[in-house]
Image (cartoon, coloured by chain):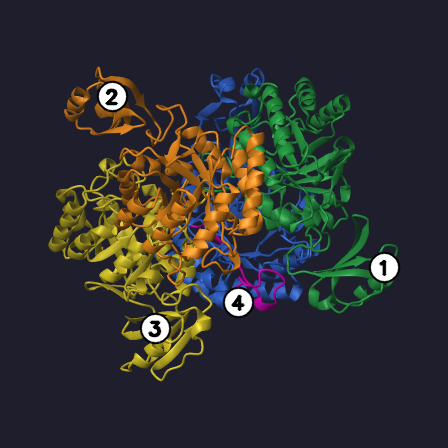
Chain colours: A yellow, B orange, C green, D blue
């Protein structure tokens, strides 16, 4: 595909006419304060020229909006007043699943106190088995909203289906697309249209390149607030639940302008491994971390093996801060 | 979980009352002519007894309805008058994507003539890249319906989102859930409720056990007409597009009463490999095959590398028949 | 690299001089009745011409002797009077490990009677754990030799280290290089020099391309009698021990002139799966099968879960014959 | 298996007699200043008792000597005066392959100056292709020895075959077993007998558990100086050469008393990724790093894409020191 970046303040109508006169597909959209047009396939539009165009990017990659050929500066995603992708390593913490108001408030206050910037919690839970706890649904989102109001922490929560868009519009500050929906293209488009910041997880069988292509679906709707998330892939190794692919994350950061989050809790599968993998993620360059914390992990309704206690999370935050400082960042 | 299989003609009301009086979750449903109740977790219900119950299955597996501890006989899934899971190896063939009426009718007639029993074709296409052809949507389903009427072949086509359920109700005979939606649990439930036969593909990063758990979501809605489909998993090998896991299929057949389909086209990625992998699938015990056929593969709008010509498909059908015969089956 | 195939009966001395005068590396050898020279890197030798040269093959592939750019006809490997790679599907069968003379003789007679063409048995056993049975060593080879003399079946057995070359020279008819030594380049070279037919297994973390490169080490010593063997790779799937990659085998057959063996026993890990995977391998085009058979699998000192009984093997041979016949081959 | 740890100064002869009188296999050896006996299978020896025994460890794990059930304190491996496994993060650096004396000396001096503690360099090179540079062999070892004498850095180099043991005895301070030989059990035993410290790499298709079992082969020869090395595994991801499995390393550290090295160069495959992965490895808890450095990477005879320049390595050492300090370690 070919990307036309328009001059600020220019009129796109003649370019639009020229593209219409070809048999190419094309789309105009605004991203990061620029009007751009993406058109494909190449052979139909490579000779199109127009005064309004500042830069033309013709790429052999499988993504262009998510790539850094046209946008060299790293993107900073704002979730209310929290900036992801800047100097500060942002930590989102909270329970795997919202179980009730008390549990959620307890965790929210604890992670806020320890230094987390965002509250994460699952309301709609994607569960491998229909016999597992499926989450509280909309009720869970309301509890998260309430915890957000009490603590001031913006809320990030996972959406499972486009029919729930309205609830997320009302109650969430950042919408997570989970690993199992990483190539649910309908959902990607709907969340793109919603316009809220998106935390897009890599599918457990997907390459980094495919993750960028999934992001492309969201950006193409004019929503540039996407944080990519490495959360472990499926491999033959059995001492961990998934294999956290920090090499993939580092490679991904060189391919894209988008910030990267790392989720050390899910690949660890065991709480003893979470600290080390969180620190490794920060050292590798993660802009954000997603950490599961539960007031009493041993009775958690999901992922009880890998959630940290508030005390352990507090200690982890201290270690993250020390490490970030040594790397020239804050946390 | 615990499965209660009720005596034919018995009244389930007392069992229902007993389960209500526990703190367990439970669900009554009809499957394969039996009324059954599934309840969980075990410790809440293991002492429940009732006159209406014929068999109790208490399993350590992560699935029960899809497993063969309660149902030893292989399930035969009927798509109109086509039986999948019986003696005959059923072949579904057609284009990767419905591109237009002529292309679809041409292929439909050719595969019918060659001996295919079902017409497969993509109307809604899940594409890794937003710049790839996304399918004709509802228009594609109508074309398939028309081709079905002309040839008598029932139609199988992939659904991408629960919002399209009505169109599939109207136009499709069998609904396919693709690899990328294999753990889209909302969609699994909706397709379960729809009641039409389902072709459920294994996700490219999912285990066979997870495939059975996904099937469990569908069965739990009372829809027992599920065909499982092996279509290749993600591995390090690069000479093929995906690694067709026939060992997983054979293991899956020993774990479940549901029939298995194999899709040799997608893992092959190259048309030269399709015949050999199709024959291997039949020899391994596949009850159904899914083969991509296009009148002119070289100009196909998707998967042009792996679609067979009608002539090549015709030859493949002859080979499948010879092989099936040697194995004591028909095709 | 560049391959020079010399005219039959021509004198290679002038070509040799010309290559010496470059700074290229080169090697002359005889393969399949032809004298050939392989030289590299390309830029040093691409202008070398000589009267003695019949064909020049310049390849971008990572292997040339094992590839089919210079040799289109399939190679037939002879192990005494058994031909692998021809019309007949050759079955090698026997115990995972030689445990004693009686066990080996019993199996050898049984598999001979059922129709096997080769006796396979492990004398030197590569075991993940030092606490597992390590094999009888040279004593095991002698037992195999004796069983071979009684039954007429040539013997194939695995070599673990180049220091044992002499014993294999004396007692074995075909030397197996196991999955864990697939990239033991010293051993590959030594077995190349030995000159006996080689059964080269794919490493559990190796690509098909790497398997061909390993074969190249053997061919480069002038030993063209190599049978490649697919035996399952490491993936995330857990219902089988390894994932038998028949797609990789089919792709490999299109890349090379060498025959392919499939080992369904090791990837299966469970005897219930062996028949189906053996039949699938034949349908996919395997020229040879390697099947583990033990008179009493339940007391076997290794791999007791996956070895077939003689009766089960007898039945399998009947099924293989029926299948091969349907495919236009014998067995 | 069962491990008997003997009292210091006790006489092992009665235990030896008792074990002889069973039908178990057993082995006496000295490790870490203790005399121990390992015996198997369990059922033959579980009732053996003797005065000389201080502790009995009966494990369900697949390894015992390499595990931490009997030895809780972390093992410190000494390579001359360099301690691996203590507070200091030890860095071994040098060229992928020794190409000539000048190149090696230049790098040795540069990495010494930058703060490396060990000189790594390849003399015998395991190459996927026979057409790649195979290393200088013994000549390379001599060059490394000379560079060691000039800089005071102990030498670590890879052995490919047990026939080269004598050369390594003479010229190397630490013997590396590479990924492709990680399950070359003959070589593991020979290197165990040699008695020099061993750097044991994980095979690209091996689990962490299998790595510990390979270490067990070395420990069983009475050689406890083993450093385990994570160097990336084979997965489907293609943006890096291998997938560095830091989760596996962290899990391995919880399973064993042996120190862990990480090799970020090989999985990176691209020099741009090496810094980030090296830092991530240290943050995850690596006791040692293996970094490829070449005076002019662009003309290197092997792995030219991933070797660092001396300047880049100098900067990396500064970053490693800052990070180690933040983690309470030195470097």
Q: What secondary structure prevails in the magenta region? A: loop
Q: Is residue A101 positioned above or below C325 on the image? A: below
Question: Label 1: few (<14), some or many (≥20) within 10 Å?
Answer: some
Residue C288 occupies quadrant: top right
Q: Which residue is mark 4?
A: D310
Label at residue C103: none
Residue A185 is situated, as x and y percent measured from the top left of the image, at: 33, 55
- Report the side of B46 relative to B104 (left or right): left
Q: Which residue is mark 2?
A: B46
Pointer 3 and pointer 1: residues touching (CB < 8 Å)? no
The chain ID associated with circle 4 is D
Point out the stretch of residues depicted in magenta: D286-308
Camera-nearest residue between B309 and C272: B309
Question: Label 4: few (<14), some or many (≥20) within 10 Å?
Answer: many
Q: Distance from label 4 to label 3 (Cα)?
A: 44 Å
Q: Residue at x 33, y 46 (%)?
A: A266
Q: Which residue is mark 3?
A: A37
Under circle 1, the secondary element is loop
Residue D258 is situated, as x and y percent measured from the top left of the image, at: 47, 42
The answer, for residue B32, to whether it is visible in the render is yes
Does the stretch in magenta take in A121?
A: no
Q: Which residue is mark 1?
A: C12
Same-subunit check for callouts 2 and 1? no
Camera-nearest residue between B55 and A101: B55
The chain ID associated with circle 3 is A
Q: Is residue A48 positioned above or below A291 on the image? A: below
Q: Distance from label 2 to label 4 (Cα)?
A: 68 Å
- Report the side of C52 relative to A296 (left or right): right
Q: Distance from label 4 to label 1 (Cα)?
A: 47 Å
The answer, for residue D330, to whether it is visible in the render is no
The chain ID associated with circle 2 is B
């Amino acid at each position: 595909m070919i990307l036309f970046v328009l001059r600020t303040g220019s009129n796109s109508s003649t370019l639009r006419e020229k593209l219409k006169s070809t048999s190419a597909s094309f789309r105009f959209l605004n991203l990061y304060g620029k009007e751009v047009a993406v058109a494909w396939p190449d052979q139909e539009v490579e000779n199109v020229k127009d005064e309004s165009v500042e830069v033309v990017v013709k790429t052999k990659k499988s993504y262009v909006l998510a790539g850094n050929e046209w946008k060299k500066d790293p993107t900073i995603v704002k979730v209310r007043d929290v900036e992801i992708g800047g100097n500060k390593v942002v930590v989102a913490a909270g329970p795997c699943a919202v179980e009730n108001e008390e549990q959620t408030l307890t965790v929210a206050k604890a992670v806020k106190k320890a230094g987390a910037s965002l509250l994460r919690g699952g309301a709609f839970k994607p569960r491998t088995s229909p016999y597992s706890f499926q989450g509280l649904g909309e009720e869970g989102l309301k509890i998260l909203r309430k915890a957000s109001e009490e603590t001031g922490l913006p809320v990030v929560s996972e959406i499972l289906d486009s029919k729930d868009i309205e609830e997320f519009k009302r109650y969430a500050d950042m919408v997570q697309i989970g690993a199992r929906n990483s190539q649910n293209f309908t959902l990607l488009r709907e969340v793109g249209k919603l316009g809220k910041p998106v935390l897009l997880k890599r599918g457990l069988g997907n390459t980094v390149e495919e993750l960028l292509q999934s992001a492309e679906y969201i950006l193409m709707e004019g929503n540039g607030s996407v944080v990519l998330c490495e959360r472990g892939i499926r491999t033959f190794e059995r001492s961990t639940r998934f294999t956290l692919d920090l090499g993939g994350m580092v490679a991904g950061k060189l391919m894209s302008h988008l910030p990267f989050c790392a989720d050390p809790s899910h690949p660890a599968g065991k709480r003893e491994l979470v600290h080390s993998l969180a620190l490794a993620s920060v050292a590798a360059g993660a802009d954000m971390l997603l950490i599961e914390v539960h007031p009493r992990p041993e009775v958690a309704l999901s992922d009880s093996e890998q959630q940290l206690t508030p005390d352990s999370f507090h200690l982890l935050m201290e270690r993250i801060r020390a490490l970030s400082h040594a790397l020239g960042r804050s946390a």
